[in-house]
Image: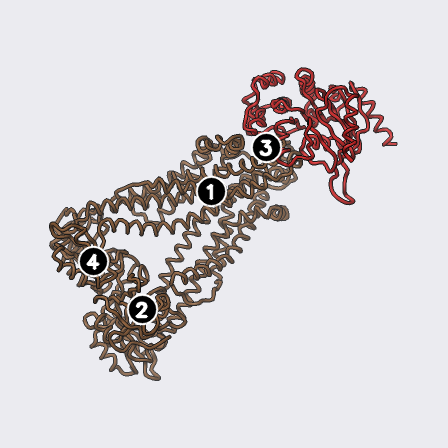
Amino acid sequence: MLRATWKSLMGHKLRLAATAISVVLGVGLVSGAYVLTDAMGDAFDGLFGEIVSGVDVSVRGTQAFGQTPGPGAGVTDQRQPVPTSLFAQIKAIDGVAAADFTVEGYAQLIGSDGEPVGGMGPPTIGVNAPTVPELSTGLEVREGRLPTQPGEIALDAGTAQTQGLEVGDAITVVTTRPAEEQEVVGTVGFGQLDSLMGATLVIFDAETATELFAVDGGYSSVEVAAAPGVDSAALRDRIASVAGAQFEVLTGEGLAQDLAGEVKQGLGFLTTVLLVFAGVALFVGAFLIANTFSIIVAQRTRELALLRAVGASRRQVLGSVLGEATATGLFGAVLGLLFGFAVAAGLTAVMGAIGVDLPRADLTLRPRTVVVSLIVGVGVTVVAAVAPALRATRVAPVAALQAVAAPPPPTSSRMRIIGGGVLAVIGIALLAAGLFADGGIEVVGAGAVVFLLAVAVLSPLAVRPLMRVIGLPARARGAAGELATRNAVRSPSRTASTAAALMIGLALVSFVLILTQSVRATADDVIEQAFRAEFVVGVGDGFTPISPEVADRLEELAEVAVAARQRVGQFRRDGTTQVLGAMPADRIEEVFSIDVIEGSFAAADNGLVVSDDVAEKEGWSTGDSVDVEFALTGEQSLPIVGVFDGQGVDVDFMTGLAMYERHFRDQLDLSVYVRLADGVTVEQARPVLEAAVADFPTARVQDQTDLREQIDQQLNQLLSMIFVLLALSILIALFGIVNTLGLSIYERIRELGLLRAVGMSRRQVRTMVRWEAVLIAVLGAVLGLLVGVVFAWMLTRALADQGITQFAVPGGQLAIAVILAALAGVLAAIVPARRASRIKMLEAISAE
Amino acid sequence: MTQPRVGEAIGDLALTGGAVAARAVELTKVYGKGETAVRALDGVTIDFAAQQLTAVMGPSGSGKSTLMHCMAALDEPSSGQVLIGDTDVSKLNERQRTRLRRDRVGFVFQAYNLLPTLTAAENIELPQRLAGGKPDSGWLETVLDTVGLRDRLTHRPAELSGGQQQRVALARALAGKPEIVFADEPTGNLDSRAGAEILGFLRRSVKEFGQTVVMVTHDPSAAAYADRVIFLADGRVIDELAEPTAERVLDRMRAFDAPREA
């Protein structure tokens, strides 16, 4: 039996390759994710070890919890500053050879084009120049020197290079103070790196940095060098006993691990994205594999029957098919493992190209990567081949003797309806549980997978009716189109499972398209309905802050009635991170039209105002107390002073500015909402506002139209990622169509010969094959769209109480997706069509 | 070289009396190369008279199928000429040959003659549909009446018996009013009754509608339906017989076989 399996494999190398391609892609993404993050992890461990090499002990405030990337994440960690008095105490501790302090905060560079440099994710950090040389060995001066007086700065070499800055050049820097021109006196690197993960670093002289960044006169951290012969762990313990529990005291090694850990956590996001993509690739690929094996079994009916007739057991037949699957999976997994290196190398190059400087790292293959890749690759292939393999065991031995070997009967419609129906119910139940009962993203994902499987099981039943419609344009194009339509419905299950690959891709894409369109429509609605402010001034990315002075200056303008600063921060409640919005308590209702259901915003400086959704879910009302935790100030019990209608408001927790000032370190504004004085028009006000904030180039003055455009831009960025997914699934689906068409042509070779004999031209043969491919692709796209609409509708319903009030279907974009799918069909048909048109007519007619 | 041969062939016209529908001149077909080369046709020159049923006979490997494939523009001869009407088939390119097959030639194969996805009626109309048109409806009615398929038109091939399928194939071959119909052992897969039916239809299409039919067969009783029998052996025309009967055909065949066995 093993020999038969092997021969079958080697006899169809092309088929093997086309089947394995999806495994290669999926496993490649899996192994690429591991290879990359392993290498990066190693590299960052080494890098931070190097950077903190002179530091024996580090002291900083404790942080109750780490920040979650996103709104309110803050520029710096939320840590208690180290008071100068403690710094003096530490210096005096026995065994301390030298001590230096670090202060850091927000410093934004403005390029010569007037646009902010960097940001949009990676932080823009300002820091002091070290004052004790032996404690700063990790910071290498590449060119020039470190700043020593006000007006001088040093930059990370990476940023200097991208900005084309040389020592001696001037650049504008925005901090909490207005924009100031600074002279670049040097550039620095960090070990082998020119920049840190895309962050921009501005080094000020120690005095200026302290003025700018020292919070309450304290330092961000204190670094200590041990005296010769003093053990760093012993010194750490000695310092810790002086500093007390409010402060975190680490050895240099511990600090390096901690810093590397944070970066690795950031890289974890990349791993997740890659693994999700891999999951989609493998899920889509499983359909391709199942389909190919179904066709193989159908084609090998006579051979399988003969094996059965001469005494092979059902188990042996099963083993033969699964053996071929194992070999195919192994082949794909091994290639995928290698492809993973290319993925890792490619991603490193891409990140480098967009300015995220990653440490040079040797790509290593850990046993874990090999094991996971092989299990995933072989597992997916074998699981996908189980159904066809079981069907193979049902081949009757007598089929070997029949003139036309009848393949085993396909699954009956009844079984399909029952099986698909059960799956659909389970899928929808899981989706509902995940979306409406807070089952979590995993439950939603599982529901989506099960629902897609249900559609895949049921879709063969829809092939004939759908093709009657989809096939109309094909049939209008004459005999070739007509024949293509007939061929497409010939084996509905084959057509449907070939289309399934595209269905999944298009379902995801249309889901996201509809969702973003709905978000867009909702945002427009909110801006129109809830905003009483005519202008919003800020960076506009949702997390980069601006100086508080912006609001001060706006408030002074005669044209401005109200300038309300908005801040955001994170806190934890019940183990999850929440976003807290803050505004001067007496201004909130002046710039927003929010319905207050209970209590009022007036008391917001001393408590929380929560959305009605949260209040309802938690059973809270005004007067209740809530336990929350701030990173800076730890656990707190806060009263609820009001409940607002959450419709159209994107935060569930709001508070007054005074409360924010007590619990957060950075006192920076996210944006300023401006309401104009009576009689002042938007057109009149704009130049006045722009002039007032001209010293803060990152602050953009946006009216409601600008805001809408900006939301569009942000959504479009999200969409570009989705198009990578679309491309990936279309690519795999393309191979699926190539495979199915190739096998169909092989099966129908006599028909092709006959058609050519009675006068079908080669061009018509190609047209016929192409139409069949297009029909399959469009079928997949249409099914995918339907599924995507269902998903998006469910999600928007689930998010209705979180402010997504609109359900909008972007018809044009969806039409483009279908057209792209059809084009993929045309592309997929090129090789099979060529082959079909070049068959040797006479051999084909007399083929067995 | 070929010119005088054509002249010779035209000289033969007088002997057969009628017009010539198709003609082979010094037709040679060699498969393979070098030592393994097989001369399937070795200088065949022959006329197929219009409005006649011609049978081509010969033992396996005599080249009768190859002759027909070359005549019908399904295959390209190694050398020599094929004329369908006035058209020199050997001078046509691939596209022109396809069009010739579609518009001017009809085919009936031994088996697997129909597309399983199309109904009987659709199969019959296929060549005209491929040309972007429809068969002449009056003529189609006549053909359908002749082969007697009226009540089976909406059936698919899988729902038809072998004889019925072959009648559909015959109707398809005739539907385009071709200049000549080639039938490659059309009764080879049928029982004798169904076979006789098909032969009867071929005969009628010649006698009643003036069709020209060339039929390859190895069955003497099938050859007996023909106006004329051509005998092929080793790629050459070795004999012919006008107004054949099964017995006379059989006698001739025995005569060819005898010296070989000796």
**Residue A766 picture location, percent across and down:** 55, 38
Which chain does the numbered disc 1 sit on?
A
Disc 3 residue type (three-letter): Met
Circle nearer the viewer, 3 or 4: 4
Q: Could you tell me which secondary element the residue under label 1 belongs to? A: helix
Query: Chain B takes which shade in the image?
Result: red
**Residue A555 picture location, percent across and down:** 14, 59
The tag on residue A760 is 3
Which chain does the numbered disc 3 sit on?
A
Residues packed near mark 1 inside 10 Å, few (<14), some (14 to 19) or many (20 plus): some
Q: Residue at x 12, y 49 (%)?
A: A679
Disc 2 residue type (three-letter): Leu
* Quadrant location of the C terminus of chain B in the rendered image: top right
Residues packed near mark 3 inside 10 Å, few (<14), some (14 to 19) or many (20 plus): many
Q: Nearer the viewer, residue B109 or B192?
A: B109
Quickly name the residue at label 4. A690
Q: Earlier in the sequence, mark 1 or mark 3?
A: 3
Quickly name the residue at label 1. A823
Quick check: do tags 2 and 3 share a chain?
yes
Disc 4 residue type (three-letter): Glu
Q: Is residue A641 left or right of residue A240?
A: left
Q: Quadrant of residue A833?
A: top right
Disc 1 residue type (three-letter): Leu
- Residue A769 is at least partly visible in this image: yes
Quickly name the residue at label 2. A201
Is disc 1 in contact with disc 3, using a CB cutoff of under 8 Å? Answer: no
Which chain does the numbered disc 4 sit on?
A
